[in-house]
Amino acid sequence: GSKWSYLGAEGEKMWAKKYPFCGGLFQSPIDFHDDILQYDSTLLPIELEGYNVSSFEQFILTNNGHSVKMSLSPTMNVRSLPNRYSAAQLHLHWGNRNKQEGSEHTIGGRHFAAELHIVHYNSDQYLDMNSAADKSDGLAVLAILIEIGQFNPSYEKIFSHFQNVKYKDQETSISAFNVQELLPDRLDEYYRYEGSLTTPPCYPSVLWTVFRKPVQVSQEQLLALETALYCTQQNDPAPLEMVNNFRRVQEFERMVLVSFRQ
Ligand SMILES: NS(=O)(=O)c1cc(-c2ccccc2)cc(-c2ccccc2)c1
Ligand SMILES: [Zn+2]
């Protein structure tokens, strides 16, 4: 039972008391602004392998009290990184219906509506994601910025199940689908830096790839994300809405590599 939240006494300013790495170096998320960006022509387009999972397989959707996460198949992996990284899970961060600006990374100080994280672990070096999670080359997260626009049928494959995972510890099984559908079309344009988990224990173990191009979901889909879920269990007398589950941007004195020229 992780004792942290995004609000009040256990909010992010207090995380470092129980989770020392949260007050340490290389913390995420960060703001991408021109004077810390450096073009790097060696950054290859992201190549996904085994993402086209058979629809006979199932993904498990779980409300873990901090976000909604979906288990992924370890046959899904990312090539074109220093090691082979296998998919572990994906989850989202978002704001609330009155302030639809809940992305973790920002561009030029601007939040997007929400952010999807697809977490992979270094399966060349480590047996599973838990042994990889605190190693400096342990994790690689693909981050997709989400903005309001067209209805997105691929995101609906997850969002349509929120009524079954409204409360903490609830889970439901959904038919597997090609998670590449959740990514923007330009996998060659991204920000790259070494950072951390954006939640406790904040291990500085993440190679971040944040795609330049946002994807769109409709206003109704975003509202469903912002209003369907609770941090508390179904029988809790004091229900807590799951909103604003994003960490504020961290101080950053390094360069961020970009695979694109402005
Ligand atoms: N936001 S994140 O990408 O840095 C992230 C990664 C992982 C993670 C997942 C698998 C292996 C290792 C780390 C877990 C979380 C998380 C989010 C909500 C509640 C608890 C944990 C968040
Ligand atoms: Zn995340």
Image (cartoon, helix red, strand yellow):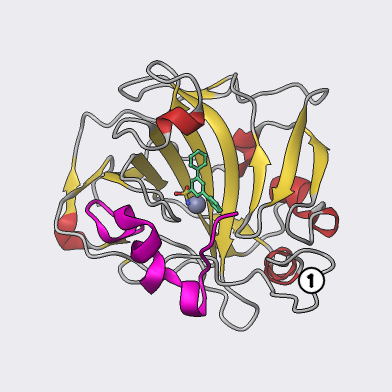
| Direction from residue 17 to residue 179 in the image, left or right | right
**Mark 1 Cα shell of 10 Å, populated few (<14), some (14-19), many (≥20):** few
| Direction from residue 142 to residue 164 in the image, left or right | right
User: SS class of the residue under badge 1?
Assistant: loop
| Direction from residue 95 to residue 211 in the image, left or right | left
Is 105 included in the stretch rendered in magenta? no
**Which amino acid type is marked by label 1?**
Asp
Q: Quadrant of residue 32?
A: bottom left
Report if residue 153 is visible in the image: no
The percent position of residue 164, horizontal first and vertical second, equals 85, 54
In magenta, the rendered stretch is 1-30
Residue at 32 percent across and 71 percent down: it is: 109
Taking 185 as reference, is 197 above or below it?
Answer: below
Taking 217 as reference, is 194 above or below it?
Answer: above
Taking 119 as reference, is 84 above or below it?
Answer: above
The percent position of residue 14, horizontal first and vertical second, equals 39, 71
Residue at 37 percent across and 37 percent down: it is: 134
Report if residue 179 is visible in the image: yes
| Quarter the N terminus occupies | bottom right
Please name whichever residue, 155 or 123, is drawn nearer the observer in this view of the structure.
123
Residue at 51 percent across and 70 percent down: it is: 6
The percent position of residue 97, horizontal first and vertical second, equals 65, 78
Residue at 15 percent across and 61 percent down: it is: 35
The percent position of residue 29, horizontal first and vertical second, equals 36, 58
Please name whichever residue, 18 or 174, is drawn nearer the observer in this view of the structure.
18
Q: Quadrant of residue 217?
A: bottom right
Please name whichever residue, 233 or 51, is drawn nearer the observer in this view of the structure.
233
Residue that mark 1 sits on: 236
